Image: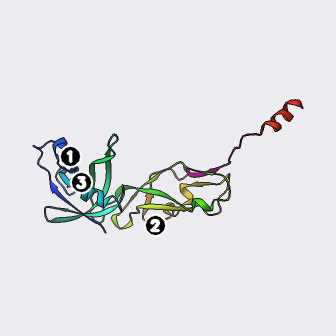
Amino acid sequence: MNTLSAEKRDMQIKAKKLRREGFVTGNVFGKNMEGSMPLKIEKKEAERILRTCNKGSQLKLTVDGETMPVLLKEIDYNPMKHEIVEMDFQALVKGEKVHSVAEVVLLNHDKVKSGVVELLLEEISYEALPENLVEKVEIDLTGKQAGDTIRVADLPIATTEGIHLKTNPEETVVQVTEVHNEVPEDEETETEEE
């Protein structure tokens, strides 16, 4: 499990100033905590962790020498600069269910028989105990063709014991649609003449 180091944030210092100094702001909250704990994370440390983790990932958060298991709940980016500005975490408690999301990852695009793959749902929402958390759901596209659809109910996460889906099981995750080519001009004239 990945470990992220952070420090408690002094609320007297504005977030904008911290960001200019190379920090990402954040919060950690949880059932056994009084309120939330504001954090500051070195930007390089945040970027390092996001190379392997994303929203819904479980990791260890070390704050001023104390380590706790957490769930990465939110990641906010500055849309103009494409930089991380905020990360929020939920402290995990053994035996307590948490709401999370699993990222949908498509595999083997090059092995689709025919059609264009459309990803309609990027993440699946669910509730589970910390030991049952899932970071991603992989979908193998090998052999898929125009007309094929994959619903949430078709995925292993829908039948995994200990996971309660929040996303509608009938919702379409992926569909493969037909490629519509333009009709050549000579065929168009033949159709008009008939």
Specify the segment rendered in magenta. 172-183
Q: In the picture provided, is 107 more to the left or to the right than 9? A: right
Which residue: 88% across, 30% down?
193
Closer to the camera in the image, 74 or 85: 85
Q: Quadrant of residue 142?
A: bottom right
Which residue: 27% across, 55% down?
89
In the rendered image, which residue does mark 3 sit on? 43
Sequence-earlier tag: 1 or 2? 1
Q: Quadrant of the N terminus?
A: bottom left
Identity of the amino acid at label 1? Arg
Magenta-drawn stretch contains 181: yes
Mark 1 and mark 2 residues within 8 Å of each other at the beta carbon = no
In the rendered image, which residue does mark 2 sit on? 161
Name the secondary structure under disc 1: helix
Q: In the picture provided, is 84 more to the left or to the right than 40? A: right
Q: Is residue 30 visible?
A: no
Q: Quadrant of residue 131?
A: bottom left
Q: Quadrant of the C terminus?
A: top right
Which residue: 17% across, 48% down?
21
Identity of the amino acid at label 3? Lys
Q: How is the image coloured?
A: rainbow
In the rendered image, which residue does mark 1 sit on? 19
Alpha carbon distance from label 1 to label 3? 8 Å
User: Which numbered disc, 3 or 2, marks the residue closer to the eye?
Assistant: 3
Sequence-earlier tag: 1 or 3? 1
Q: Quadrant of residue 33?
A: bottom left
Give neighbour class at mark 3: few <14, some 14-19, many 20+ (Cα, 10 Å). some
Alpha carbon distance from label 3 to label 2? 37 Å
Residue 119 position within the rendered picture, expressed as x and y whole percent measured from the top left = 54, 50
Which residue: 48% across, 65% down?
160
